[in-house]
Image: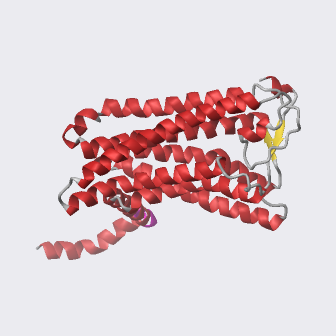
């Protein structure tokens, strides 16, 4: 990229100026980041280890959890490091990587949520054909298409952004490298580029949104025809977590990028960005495990297994052997 020779780093917007608030920001982000790592890590491990969860629904949920781990790791660690070391700098290549990974995660998540809506549509509206339609090869192809579309989407945005000359300083008015803020540093007129990217993004996300809405219209029509209350409960327990994640994803995204002009405060802008970037990856595991009995049971077994292993590690084999040798005569006598 031609800008690399003339611009080596960017300066990000700091959350706070005083040292105490910087450390508070570091602590809050660290807690959210660890919660996201723990929650998504538990979901991934539970799905991978429990054979009962080797179904299309949990396969796509595993993909979503892997994506959430990557998306929150794109911006949060760098922001934490800047607050901890009292700096604002990010390298040119690091900024380009942030832009690419951010749009990659956004594109893949939109596609995965759409595929998950289709999976629920087939499970509820065509239950007898479910395993024929959603076989393993189809699921792998859908997941691969979601990841590939995110890669192409990110490549388009990143290449289009960093191919323009930048000469209006190096200060990015955000806590991560965001494309609209980078366009403000352009020497040339970037209006057409920005409009083109907005239109491409709007068409992609509008298509996903329409498909999800149509899927749930068919789902709710099928659910209303279910005679038993137990069938209603099972159908809604499958759909409500996905609907909650979709609502969180869409609402925070709309508020972040289609906010009213009255929202001009940089502090409020940062809070909105945090709601969009940081909160969903940490909340998604909680949302999916709250009303999902199978996933909760798998998580309980996983936690119990970890606790048992820790308890066994606390007692060395020699100690266990000595305890067994002491009790061996009693056991032998009892067996007689």
State whether residue 150 is above or below residue 86.
above
Residue 50 appears anywhere in the view: yes
On the image, which quarter does residue 230 sit in?
bottom left
Q: Which of 144 and 182 is in front in this view?
A: 182
Q: Position of residue 92 (x, y in %)?
A: 78, 35
On the image, which quarter does residue 17 sit in?
bottom right
Magenta part, dominant SS: helix
Q: Is residue 106 left or right of residue 168?
A: left
Q: In this view, does 296 lie to the left or right of 314?
A: left
Q: What residue is rendered at 74% in x and 50% in y?
A: 175
State whether residue 31 is above or below residue 130.
below
Q: Nearer the viewer, residue 330 or 246?
A: 246
State whether residue 286 is above or below residue 125.
below
Q: Residue furthest left?
A: 336
- Indicate the colouring scheme: secondary structure
Q: Position of residue 50 (x, y in %)?
A: 32, 50
Residue 54 appears anywhere in the view: no
**What's drawn in magenta, residue-wise?**
312-316
Q: What residue is rendered at 79% in x and 47% in y?
A: 173
Does the segment drawn in magenta span residue 282?
A: no
Count of marks placed on residues: 0
Q: Residue furthest top?
A: 2
Q: What residue is rendered at 35% in x and 34% in y?
A: 139
Q: Position of residue 262 (x, y in %)?
A: 74, 56
State whether residue 180 is above or below residue 317.
above
Q: What residue is rendered at 83% in x and 36% in y?
A: 185
Quarter placement of the C terminus: bottom left
Q: Which residue lies furthest to the front in this view?
A: 261
Q: Where is residue 154 in the image (x, y as percent from the top left)?
A: 61, 32
Quarter placement of the N terminus: top right
């Amino acid at each position: 990229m031609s800008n690399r020779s003339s611009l080596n780093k960017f300066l990000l917007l700091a959350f706070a100026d005083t040292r105490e608030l910087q450390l508070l920001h570091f602590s809050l982000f660290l807690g959210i980041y660890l919660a996201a790592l723990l929650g998504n890590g538990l979901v991934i491990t539970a799905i991978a280890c429990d054979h009962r969860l080797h179904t299309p629904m949990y396969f796509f949920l595993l993909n979503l959890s892997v994506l959430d781990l990557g998306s929150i790791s794109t911006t949060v660690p760098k922001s934490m490091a800047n607050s901890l070391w009292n700096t604002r700098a990010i390298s040119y290549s690091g900024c380009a990587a942030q832009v690419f990974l951010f749009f990659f995660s956004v594109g893949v998540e939109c596609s995965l949520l759409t595929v998950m809506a289709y999976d629920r549509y087939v499970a509820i509206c065509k239950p007898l054909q479910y395993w024929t339609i959603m076989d393993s090869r189809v699921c792998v192809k859908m997941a691969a298409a979601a990841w590939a579309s995110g890669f192409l989407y990110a490549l388009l945005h990143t290449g289009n952004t960093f191919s323009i000359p930048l000469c209006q300083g190096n200060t990015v008015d955000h806590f991560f490298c965001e494309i609209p803020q980078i366009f403000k540093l352009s020497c040339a007129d970037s209006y057409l580029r920005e409009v083109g990217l907005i239109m491409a993004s709007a068409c992609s996300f509008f298509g996903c949104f329409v498909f999800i809405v149509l899927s749930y219209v068919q789902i709710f029509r099928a659910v209303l025809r279910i005679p038993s209350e137990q069938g209603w409960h099972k159908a809604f327990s499958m759909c409500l977590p996905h609907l909650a994640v979709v609502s969180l994803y869409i609402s925070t995204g709309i508020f972040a990028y289609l906010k009213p002009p009255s929202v001009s405060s940089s502090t409020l802008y940062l809070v909105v960005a945090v709601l969009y970037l940081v909160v969903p990856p940490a909340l998604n595991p909680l949302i999916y495990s709250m009303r999902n009995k199978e996933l909760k049971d798998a998580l309980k077994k996983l936690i119990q297994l970890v606790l048992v292993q820790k308890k066994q590690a606390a007692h060395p084999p020699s100690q266990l052997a000595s305890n067994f040798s002491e009790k061996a005569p009693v056991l032998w006598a009892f067996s007689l």
